[in-house]
Image (tube, helix red, strand yellow):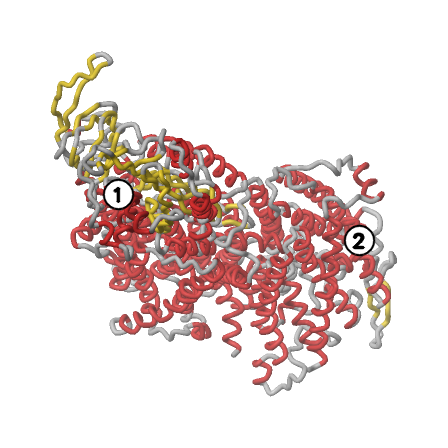
């Protein structure tokens, strides 16, 4: 399936301009208070503004020179702006992505029909799509843009959904089935459908998603709340540390300037993660959106990272949509050429994928052209598959006497009945061959000509290339995969083994999915599933992560907590990785942020006390130029590390399925040890520059 | 290898060798199916306790706090009236309310910060029925509180966590009493007094008459170590020749105090059936201990550079404040062990330790989780564990969980509060003391604040820092240079003691109680295993960083400044 994964550069000019403007708007304390870490920085900045104003008006330099205080104040302000910018750019990107989807649903005319009593008349009334409300019924004809999300209540149409999915091949949507849903902004190519609006204006999934990336209405996820509490805890510890430092300094007869005390405080509190935290959360939602998945809550994305069990439908996920013919087995006494010819003839007019694959196989064999070129179906009658006969075929006029050659193909027992009724025998060898095919996960199709068995065609499920590697990857993440199929247990087992899934549900009925999910959940597991039909809805609701396909019914979309615009069943794997990435980015940046403090202590503490206790010069391991340059360098490092890490926060830290312990070791090494070492180098370098000025 | 070092190795080696079987024994004592003996049944009957009753974590905490409050009132009353009560052969006076407040709390919370001297400040009655009694019950309270979190490690979802009273009674009858009995006998055989007579009188070579205090000391000195209490019978604690007569008793007392903290870890491993997990924790704690111990031993054996500059030979190492019969290594080992496990008994004067050793002793109390006190050591480790699990859970891409239980906002809130508390109590206390010292040095108090410190500058600062750190960690050792028996220090440390004891018990028990009610998620290959060296390293880093970040400026102003000045 072709995907339109747009990955524009992180900082597009337009977005950056919006984000810069937003950074200043977000300085408002009423907005900033939601982020306790950055809020305390703002208080510190305000204090510094007052101190600077005092120095400027009185000329008193006991608190350090005016220039130094102005510099500290400016850097503190910059720290908040950087943090605001991180959040703003993440929001802007998310919104831009959502807007590009929303563009597909600009105001379009809608041909509404109004009910008279309980009846819909066919009287059309053209209104703007914005005026549509839930329950309205509209008509779409070829060439029309569908004005709103809805469900087809009458008719069938081919629809071009490329505006949303990027998939150029048109899809068929029809009333009554599991593929009855249409999305606003897509285009009807053929036929006429009657659609009922299913969402209120402004309440579509896309609207909900846009709300999720917008700061104002964004709800923090439980994990984000817990992390915020931990960061607030650290912040409080440093409030105590810094407040206590004042009497300590008095005891040591060292005056500490307000600028130094506030700088120490701002450096120690976890501003890096505090500044990037909401950007990480928004970027996670944004990544989901870029994968064409609309999540209804941030929590759903997070939960996806924890999934233990994944329920996947066989067809379309594990196997390529349909079965394919792989072999012809002629009955005893029938030449291979004869058998292939009959098979090909039976399928020439058969538009089903199975039928096409039979003709394809017939053409590709070494008998190839010799057989198929001589085929002619002129004047033939197509016999369609019915549930009753469980066979299909073709009647071809043979000769001029009006006699007809009847070629049929179908399930073993249906052909057997047909053959026996005509008084012919069904060859044992063919029966055995058919059984063998079934045992190997295939489907046997017996071919007959004029009630004489010609042989059996083997149809095989084609397992998607690369799918077993994906299951391997999932297994390494600790996710168990379960295949759901309507096949008999024998076939199911065979395919399950071949594809490498961990478990399967054979001859599955909708309630089996539900029961399986419940059973896994009682064992404490988190279950994800994908579904589209109305009968999937209860299971989608029961699953911890339910991804509904956009083509699915409204009921399915309401029940799940994500909607996949691409209708790609393997999307769950990506969703799981997006969830994990989100958590990893939070964890690693927290570690990095806190590890940074070690170096900052070594920069600032000796700078504070070295005047009265010269021995503490030994703690100045970086050999920083002077007290003032040491403090300035530490705050500057603290400020610029935020924008430097914005790309990482937006892209997310990569998830590697190498086992939890190995992953922890790796991230601890990079972000823990790196977090200790990096600021030693960074502060030293900044000091070398700052040292030139002070 | 020097004999001194061999002695240290032998002490530690024997401790671990004894702790392994003791751990198994303790686990057996507390297995749910383990029966009560006639003695315990008798206690349950007179206390009208139903040993089969299961209680929620809240009910258990209420039980724990109530019974501790009762002991506090009894202890306070006895100390206030001891001068007129019997068993006072030396005629010692009653305590002032401030001192009685501090002392009663201090012993109830297993700290034993002694602002009095055993010879003159208490009577035999209070030594036995306040000190000795509280030493048993406070140690048993610690052990019982650890047992309250056991069920959160097991896969069953439960609302009850056991019965505090049963854990408490058994901790005394099956663990503390038998071990103390053996230790007391060993001490008595080596010359520690166990007599109700008053002071003995001897005439020295110079012809002076000296009164030598004694009393029923051996029993108390035994539980003082077995229960990681640390309050000495005599003022000089285990440096006193009658409290710790020789190297052998030094070994006995040393092993006795480290034994239960290590054995409790192994016992936990058996109780939750995850021995590898507790071995990793043992490993982390041991590495932490070595990080503190090795620099201490090195600096002590090298002696004081200031003395070396005077041209004085220090072939035996730094001997100031140390007993000749123990030497610098055994004293250094003791000073680290006693600070990390919250005993706080001393066999040398920490005020005279080398500056670097002083730093290590302070760090031992600031972390307070390397082995730690009886039972409570693991509880302190537990909230670091929760924070470590939270951050590393995120780093492997799962919402954090500990043994199948999701760690969420409430648990993190509690863990943060506990982590915050020690910073608040220690730094807040020292800041207050420094502020009073600087601004109100001449306040018209019984002891003027300006007269608190026996040493100026950095060392004086260390004395104040040490006192609050010791109180918060429920350690009880002192830098001793501090004039601490007065209004300010008695009340200030009294409050720190009580908060520093019960919040770190309530917090972890509450976290465990909340966790054990949560859905249990079985482990998968995506779950972060917590019984690996990697996770051990993570926990160690969390402990180190939280401690370092909270206390670095204070350490820099106190012992570190001194250390760099001496160099």
Position in image of residue B284 (x %, y %): 58, 63
Residue B161: x %, y % from top left: 64, 41
The percent coordinates of residue A2 (x first, y second) are 25, 50
Question: Residue at position x 17%, y 28% from top?
Answer: A192
- Res B498 visible: no
- Parent chain of label 1: A
At x 34%, y 69%, the residue is A683
Q: Tell which residue pokes out farthest to the bottom in this image.
A: B311
Residue A637 can be seen, yes or no: yes
Q: Quadrant of residue A466?
A: bottom left
Q: Position of residue B58 (x, y in %)?
A: 61, 38
| SS for callout 1 | helix
In this orientation, which residue lies closer to the viewer: B101 or A426? Answer: A426
Q: Secondary structure at mark 2?
A: helix
Which disc is residue B177 wearing?
A: 2
* Label 2: how many Cα within 10 Å (few below 14, some 14–19, many 20+): some
In the depicted view, which residue is nearer to us: B340 or A145? Answer: A145
The vertical placement of A303 against B372, above or below, is: above
Q: Are marks 1 and 2 in contact (CB under 8 Å)?
A: no
Mark 1 or 2: the one toward you: 1
- Left or right relative to B148: residue A224: left
Query: On the image, numbered disc 1 is attached to which residue?
Result: A345
Q: Which mark is residue B62?
A: none
């Amino acid at each position: 399936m072709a995907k339109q994964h747009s990955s524009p550069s992180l900082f597009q000019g337009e977005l950056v301009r919006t984000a810069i403007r937003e950074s200043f708007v977000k300085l408002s304390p009423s907005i900033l208070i939601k982020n306790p870490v950055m809020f305390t920085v703002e208080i510190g900045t305000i204090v510094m503004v007052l101190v600077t104003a005092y120095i400027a008006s009185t000329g008193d330099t006991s608190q350090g020179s005016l220039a130094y205080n102005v510099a500290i104040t400016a850097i503190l302000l910059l720290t908040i702006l950087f943090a605001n910018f991180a959040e703003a750019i993440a929001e802007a990107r998310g919104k831009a992505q959502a807007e590009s989807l929303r563009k597909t649903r600009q105001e379009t005319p809608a041909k509404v029909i109004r009910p008279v009593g309980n009846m819909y008349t066919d009287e059309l009334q053209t209104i703007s799509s914005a005026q549509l409300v839930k329950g309205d019924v509209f008509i779409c004809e070829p060439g029309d843009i569908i004005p709103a999300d809805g469900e087809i209540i009458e008719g069938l149409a081919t629809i071009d959904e490329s505006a949303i999915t990027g998939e150029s091949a048109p899809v068929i949507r029809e009333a009554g089935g599991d593929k009855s849903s249409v999305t606003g902004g897509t285009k009807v190519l053929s036929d006429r459908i009657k659609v009922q609006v299913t969402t209120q204006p402004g309440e579509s999934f896309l609207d909900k998603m846009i709300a999720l990336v917008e700061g104002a209405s964004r709800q923090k996820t439980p994990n984000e709340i817990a992390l915020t509490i931990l960061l607030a805890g650290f912040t409080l510890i440093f409030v105590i540390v810094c407040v206590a430092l004042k009497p300590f300094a008095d005891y040591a007869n060292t005056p500490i300037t307000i600028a130094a005390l506030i700088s120490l405080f701002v450096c120690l509190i976890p501003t890096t993660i505090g500044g990037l935290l909401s950007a990480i959360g928004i970027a996670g939602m944004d990544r989901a959106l870029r994968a064409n998945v609309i999540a209804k809550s941030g929590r759903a994305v997070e939960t996806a990272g924890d999934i233990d069990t994944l329920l996947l439908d066989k067809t379309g996920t594990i196997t390529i949509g349909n079965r394919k013919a792989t072999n012809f087995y002629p009955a005893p006494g029938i030449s291979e050429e004869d058998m292939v010819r009959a098979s090909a003839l039976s399928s020439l007019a058969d538009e089903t994928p199975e039928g096409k694959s039979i003709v394809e196989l017939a053409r590709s064999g070494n008998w190839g052209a010799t057989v198929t070129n001589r085929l002619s179906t002129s004047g033939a009658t197509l016999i369609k598959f019915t549930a009753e006969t469980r066979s299909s075929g073709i009647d071809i006029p043979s000769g001029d006497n009006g006699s007809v050659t009847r070629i049929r193909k179908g399930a073993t027992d249906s052909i057997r009945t047909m053959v026996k009724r005509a008084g012919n025998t069904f060859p044992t060898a063919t029966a055995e061959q058919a059984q063998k095919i079934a045992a190997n996960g295939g489907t046997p199709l017996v071919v007959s000509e004029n009630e004489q068995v010609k042989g059996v065609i083997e149809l095989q499920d084609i397992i998607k290339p690369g799918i077993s590697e994906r299951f391997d990857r999932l297994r390494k993440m600790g996710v168990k995969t379960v295949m759901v199929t309507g096949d008999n247990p024998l076939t199911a087992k065979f395919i399950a083994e071949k594809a490498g899934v961990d478990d399967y549900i054979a001859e599955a009925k909708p309630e089996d999915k539900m029961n399986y999910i419940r059973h896994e959940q009682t064992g404490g597991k988190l279950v994800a599933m994908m579904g589209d039909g109305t009968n999937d809805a209860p299971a989608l609701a029961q699953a911890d992560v339910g991804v509904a396909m956009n083509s699915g019914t409204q009921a399915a979309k309401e029940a799940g907590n994500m909607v996949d615009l691409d209708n790609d069943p393997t999307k769950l794997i990506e969703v799981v990785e997006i969830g994990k990435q989100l958590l990893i980015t939070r964890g690693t940046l927290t570690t990095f942020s806190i590890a940074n403090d070690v170096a900052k202590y070594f920069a600032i503490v000796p700078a504070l006390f070295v005047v009265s206790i010269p021995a503490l010069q030994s703690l100045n391991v970086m050999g920083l130029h002077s007290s003032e340059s040491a403090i300035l360098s530490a705050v500057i490092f603290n400020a610029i590390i935020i924008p430097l890490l914005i790309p990482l926060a937006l892209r997310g830290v990569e998830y590697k399925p190498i086992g939890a312990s190995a992953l922890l070791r790796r991230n601890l090494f990079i972000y823990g040890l790196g977090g200790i070492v990096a600021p030693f180098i960074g502060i030293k370098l900044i000091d070398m520059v700052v040292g030139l000025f002070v | 290898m020097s004999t001194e070092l061999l002695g240290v190795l032998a002490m530690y080696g024997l401790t671990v060798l004894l702790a392994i079987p003791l751990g198994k024994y303790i686990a057996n004592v507390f297995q749910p199916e383990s029966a009560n003996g006639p003695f315990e049944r008798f206690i349950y009957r007179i206390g009208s306790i139903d040993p089969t009753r299961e209680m929620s974590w809240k009910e258990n905490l209420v039980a724990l706090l109530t019974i501790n409050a009762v002991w506090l009132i009894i202890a306070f009353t006895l100390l206030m009236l001891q001068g007129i009560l019997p068993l006072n052969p030396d005629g010692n006076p009653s305590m002032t309310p401030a001192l009685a407040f501090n002392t009663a709390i201090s012993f109830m919370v297993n700290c034993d910060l002694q602002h009095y001297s055993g010879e003159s400040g208490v009577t035999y009655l209070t030594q036995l029925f306040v000190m000795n009694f509280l030493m048993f019950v406070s140690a048993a309270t610690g052990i019982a509180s650890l047992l309250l979190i056991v069920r959160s490690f097991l896969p069953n979802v439960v609302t009850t966590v056991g019965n505090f009273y049963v854990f408490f009674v058994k901790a005394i009858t099956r663990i503390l009493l038998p071990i103390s009995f053996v230790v007391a006998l060993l001490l008595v055989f080596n010359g520690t007094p166990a007599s109700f007579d008053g002071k003995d009188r001897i005439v020295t070579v110079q012809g002076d008459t000296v009164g030598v205090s004694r009393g029923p000391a051996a029993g108390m000195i035994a539980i003082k170590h077995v229960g990681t209490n640390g309050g000495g019978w005599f003022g000089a604690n285990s440096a006193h020749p009658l409290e710790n007569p020789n190297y052998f008793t030094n070994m006995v007392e040393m092993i006795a105090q480290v034994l239960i903290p290590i054995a409790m870890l192994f016992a936990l491993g058996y109780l939750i059936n995850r021995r590898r997990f507790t071995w990793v924790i043992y490993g982390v704690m041991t590495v932490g201990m070595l990080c503190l111990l090795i620099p201490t031993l090195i600096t002590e054996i090298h002696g004081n550079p200031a003395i070396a500059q005077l041209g004085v030979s220090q072939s035996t190492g730094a001997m100031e404040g140390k007993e000749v019969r123990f030497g610098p290594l055994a004293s250094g080992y003791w000073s680290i062990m006693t600070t990390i496990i919250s005993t706080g008994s001393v066999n040398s004067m920490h005020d005279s330790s080398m500056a670097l050793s002083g730093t290590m002793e302070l760090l031992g109390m600031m972390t307070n989780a390397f082995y730690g006190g009886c039972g409570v050591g693991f509880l302190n480790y537990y909230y670091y564990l929760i924070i470590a699990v939270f951050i590393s859970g995120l780093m492997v891409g799962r919402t954090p969980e500990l043994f199948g239980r999701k760690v969420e906002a409430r648990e993190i809130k509690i863990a943060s509060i506990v982590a915050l508390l020690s910073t608040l109590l220690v730094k807040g206390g020292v800041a207050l003391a420094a502020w009073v010292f600087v601004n109100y040095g001449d306040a018209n108090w019984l002891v003027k604040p300006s007269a608190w410190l026996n040493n100026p500058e950095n060392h004086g600062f260390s004395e104040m820092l040490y006192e609050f750190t010791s109180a918060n960690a429920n350690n009880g050792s002192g830098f001793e240079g501090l004039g601490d028996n007065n209004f300010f220090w008695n009340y200030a440390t009294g409050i720190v003691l009580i908060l520093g004891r019960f919040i770190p018990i309530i917090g972890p028990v509450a976290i465990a109680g909340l966790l054990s009610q949560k859905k249990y998620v079985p482990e998968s290959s995506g779950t972060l295993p917590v019984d690996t060296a990697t996770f051990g390293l993570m926990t160690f880093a969390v402990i180190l960083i939280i401690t370092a970040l909270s206390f670095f400026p204070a350490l820099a102003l106190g012992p570190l400044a001194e250390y760099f000045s001496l160099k």
